[in-house]
Amino acid sequence: MEQYERVAEADRIQIFDTTLRDGEQSPGIALNTAEKVEIAQQLARLGVDVIEAGFPITSPGDFEAVQAISRTVEGPVIAGLARTHKADIDAAWNAVKDAARPRIHTFISTSDIHIIHQLQTDREDVKGQAKAAVAHARTYCEDVEFSPMDATRAEVEFTAEVCAIAVAEGASVINIPDTVGYTTPSEYADFFARLYELAPELRQVRMSVHCHDDLGLAVANSFAGVLAGARQVECAINGIGERAGNCSLEEIVMLLRTRRDAHGLDTTINTVELARTSRMVSRATGYPVQPNKAIVGRNAFAHESGIHQDGVLKERATYEIMDARDVGYDSNQIVLGKHSGRHALKDALEQLGFKVEGNALNQAFKRFKEIADKKKQVTSLDLEAIVSDEMREQGQRYDLAWFEVEAGSDRAPQARVGVTLPDGSVAVGEHSGDGPIDSVFSAIQDATETECELREYSVSAVTAGDDALGETTVMLRAFGRLASGQGVSTDIIEASARAYIRALSNALDGAAIREAEAVAAEALASPTPRP
Ligand code: KIV
Ligand code: ZN
C-alpha cells in the first residue's frame, strides 16, 4: 500500500462529516442513539475532522444522541446545528458542551426566495439575526460556524455582507451551502472568488463547501469550491442526505488523494476505513449502496471485460487508478474456523473495531457458532454483518422469537411467527401469502396487529460463495412513517423476517420521535425548517 506524506497545513482539506445530521434527514432513516454513537466512533476511526452529530433543538432524541456522541467520541470536533434562534443555540450548546472540541453551527438563508417565502422577513432582519446568533454562540464557544443557507441562489453582494457580519462577530468557519444542488462548478468557483473580493476578511477564516446532489454535481461542485479556496468539505458517507443527498465523503476524499499530483491538496482521512464505514452506514440506515458506486460500490474495483482483466493481470495500473486495498477492500483477511473460541472471536472483533463484552459478546458468540456450523469459514465481512445485526437488536421494540413456514410447488405457503412485543410477551401470527416471504411478512403484521405497506425489499450476499450469509433490506410504511431495517442470516427467510421486524420497530420509534418533535416545534414560535 502506498504511503502518503501529510500535505502542508495550508493544503489540508478538513472533512466535516454530516452523515448523522443532513444524512439522517433522508426519507426512511431514523437512527437511534446507540447506532449514532457507533457510527460516530467509526467516523473517528476514519479520521474525519468534524462530526456534525445532529440538530439538537429538533427533538429530545436528537439532543440525546448529540450529547452522547459529545461525551464518548474522542478525536473530531463535535458540531451541533442551530437556526439563529436563541433557543436553538442554547440547545446546540447544551448538547455539545461536553465534547473536548465543541462547535456550534448556525445558519440563516440569504436568498430572497427563502427570505420572502420561508422566513417571511427582509434582508435587514436576516443581517440582525445572523449577527445576534453568532454573537450569542460565541458567548459559549470559540468554534462557531456560520452558513448563509441557499447561498448559491442568493445575491452574492448580500451574502458577502452577511458573512462579513458573522466574521466580525467571531465566526471561525464560513460555509457556503448549495442547499438545493443548483450551482455548477464554474459558477460556484466564481461565487467564491466574488465573496473574497467583496469581503477580504473571509481569507482570515476557514471557508467551507456544502453541496447537494440534485443535478449530480455535489462532488464536482465541492471540488471546485476547494480549488477556489475552501478548506473544509461538508459531506456524508455514501452521499446520503436531503433529497438526492450530499457530496459523498468517500468520493471527494479519494478524488483529493488520487489526484493530489494535479492540485497538491489532501485530507488526513484514514482511507482504509472507507469501505467498512460505508457498509456500517448502509446497514444502519437501510440505504443500500449501488453496485457501481464510485469507491465503495461492490463493482468499483471489478473488471468484467476480458481485455481489462488481461491488462490488470499484467499490470494493475493499466485499468486501475486506485488500489482497492487503499479504501479497505481487503477486509476479508480475518478468518475464523468453526472451532474458534470466545477469545478468538473477541480478538477478531477488536481488530475490526468492535468492543464487545459481557452479554453482547455471549450473543455474538452464539450467532457466530450458529453461522460457523453452516459456513466453511467465517470472514471479517461475516463477523461485521452479524455483530452489526446483534447491536441493532439491542433496544428494539419488537423481536423475532421464532418462525415456521410451510411451502411447496403444489401448496399455498403458510407462515406462523412468534414476535416479542414491547411489553415482553410473545404474540403469535399466522398467514398465507404469495410466497414464503410474503406469508412471513403478513404473519408479522398479524402478530403485531399493525398495517404495513411494503415499499422496498432487496436481498444480497455478504460474501461470495454458495454458503454466504444473506442480508436483506426492507423499507415499509407503518404508524404513518417510512422506515427501513436490515437482517442477516444464512437463512434468507429468517433474514427477511428480522429486517421486517426491525423496520417495524424503527417506524414505531420514528413515530414517537415525530410526536416529540411536534411538541418541541409547538413550544417554539416558528416551525422547525429542515435545511
Ligand atoms: O443544505 C443546507 O443548506 C444545509 C445547511 C444547514 C448547511 O444543510
Ligand atoms: Zn444540506
Image: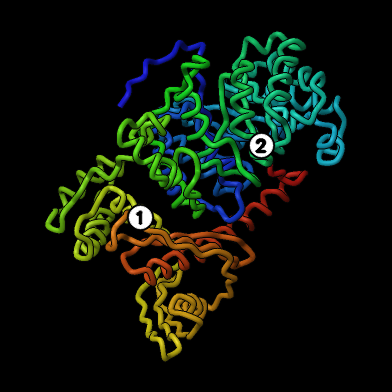
Q: Which mark is residue 88?
A: 2
- Give the residue at the far left of this rendering: 339
The answer to whether residue 169 of the structure is visible from this angle is yes
Asked if 182 appears above or below 146 in the picture, the reply is below
- Give the residue at the far bottom of this rendering: 410
Residues marked 2 and 1 touching at CB (< 8 Å): no
**Quarter of the image containing the C terminus?**
top right
Q: Nearer the viewer, residue 422 or 230?
A: 230
User: For numbered disc 2, what is the local secondary structure?
Assistant: helix
Q: Position of residue 475 (x, y in %)?
A: 54, 62
Q: Which mark is residue 204?
A: none
Q: Nearer the viewer, residue 189 or 50?
A: 189
**Does mark 2 have its CB less than 8 Å from ligand 1?**
no
Residue 496 shown left or right of residue 263 in the figure? left
> What amino acid type is highlighted by mark number 1?
Val
Q: Position of residue 180 (x, y in %)?
A: 72, 38
Residue 356 shown left or right of residue 207 in the figure? left
Q: Nearer the viewer, residue 236 or 423?
A: 236
Distance, label 2 to label 1, CA atoms, is: 42 Å
Q: Quadrant of ligand 1?
A: top right
Q: Quadrant of residue 276?
A: top left
Residue drawn at x 61%, y 15% as measured from the top left? 229
Asked if 7 appears above or below 507 in the picture, the reply is above
Dot 2 alpha-carbon crowd within 10 angstroms: few under 14, some 14 to 19, many 20 or more: many
Q: Nearer the viewer, mark 2 or mark 1?
A: 1
Dot 1 alpha-carbon crowd within 10 angstroms: few under 14, some 14 to 19, many 20 or more: some
Asked if 146 appears above or below 375 in the picture, the reply is above
The residue that mark 1 highlights is 462
Q: Quadrant of residue 155?
A: top right
> What amino acid type is highlighted by mark number 2?
Asp
